[in-house]
Image (cartoon, grey):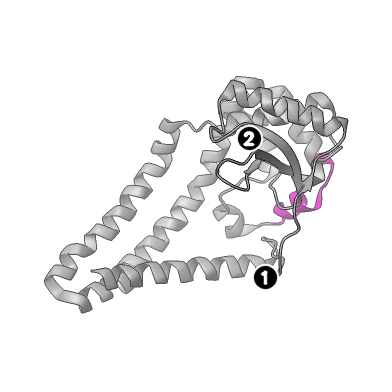
Amino acid sequence: MIIGLVGFFVALWGAVQTFLGFLIREGAVEYKPGPLELPKPGSGPEDESVLSTARDLQRQVKLPKFGEITGLAWSDYQPWYGPGFKRQGFRKPVVLLLYADLRGRLDAEERKILLTYYFLALKPRLRLLLRTLGPYIAAFLLIVFGGIPISLQYGIQGGRLYGQFVAAPAAIIILVLLLANAKGLMLRHDTYIAGLMGRRPLLDVFKKIDSLQLPRIENAKRRQGWTLCLWPMPNITERIQNLTDD
């Protein structure tokens, strides 16, 4: 059984690596060899305003729960649609990470709207998550535990064959279906957040960011065909269209 599971996960990991390699070659995913550049610490009146707003939102939303935000840094590798939270140790202060290319490009009200969107997005809708991801999690568990009777009846060789020729292909199919539906989950969550904070202000901020034509955001629009369908995170055009249609 153990050998069969190992074969299953090795085959699954190989498929994921192959998929990511293809995306890198096609230019759909950025890859930079070597160490990443460190985030740039925030400084100046604008960054103090951003930090103050973030602290207020943290107290309102009560997330993240692992410490109060005490610092701000700008990273080239942080996605535009969400923040990061960094700390050097268990009892160290929490630093808020934001997308560096947006620094200085939004006015005070636009920054507040975007930060509100970030913090509201930290609160998952459990019912929506279970409805979207529940069947796939159950299917993965069925694949894993389905190998137990095979291994018990046919031994190590039977478990290995099950892992390689049944479990791994089935898991890849489930993963593809999960990726194809994950984008819908993200867009429905956007719609929910827009209902809480107001659709028009959020839509206007998205359009403002889109109009800046920032390289990483523009690169995400290059995905086409099946890479666009399977990519789980919506690009900014899809997010704007989602809020415009509803």
The crowd level at tag 2 (other Cα within 10 Å; few <14, some 14-19, many 20+) is: some
Q: Quadrant of residue 5?
A: bottom left
Q: Residue 112's x, y, as percent? A: 74, 26
Residue furthest to the front? 91
Q: Identify the magenta region.
A: 210-222
**20 to the left or right of 73:** left
**Front-lying residue, 223 or 215:** 215
Res. 239 visible in picture: yes
Q: Residue 109's x, y, as percent? A: 80, 23
Q: Is the residue 119 above or below the residue 177 in the image? A: above
Res. 203 visible in picture: no
Q: Amino acid at mark 2?
A: Asn
**138 to the left or right of 219:** left
Q: Quadrant of the N terminus?
A: bottom left
The label on residue 25 is 1
**140 to the left or right of 70:** left
The label on residue 214 is none
Q: Nearer the viewer, mark 2 or mark 1?
A: 1
Which secondary structure lies at badge 1?
helix
Which secondary structure lies at badge 2?
helix
Q: Amino acid at mark 1?
A: Arg
Q: Quadrant of the C terminus?
A: top right
Q: Is the residue 122 above or below the residue 61 in the image? A: below
Tell me whether the residue at label 2 lies in contact with that at label 1, contact meaning CB atoms closer than 8 angstroms.
no
Is residue 104 highlighted in magenta?
no
Q: Quadrant of residue 97?
A: top right
Q: Is the residue 117 above or below the residue 235 in the image? A: above
Q: Which residue is mark 2?
A: 242
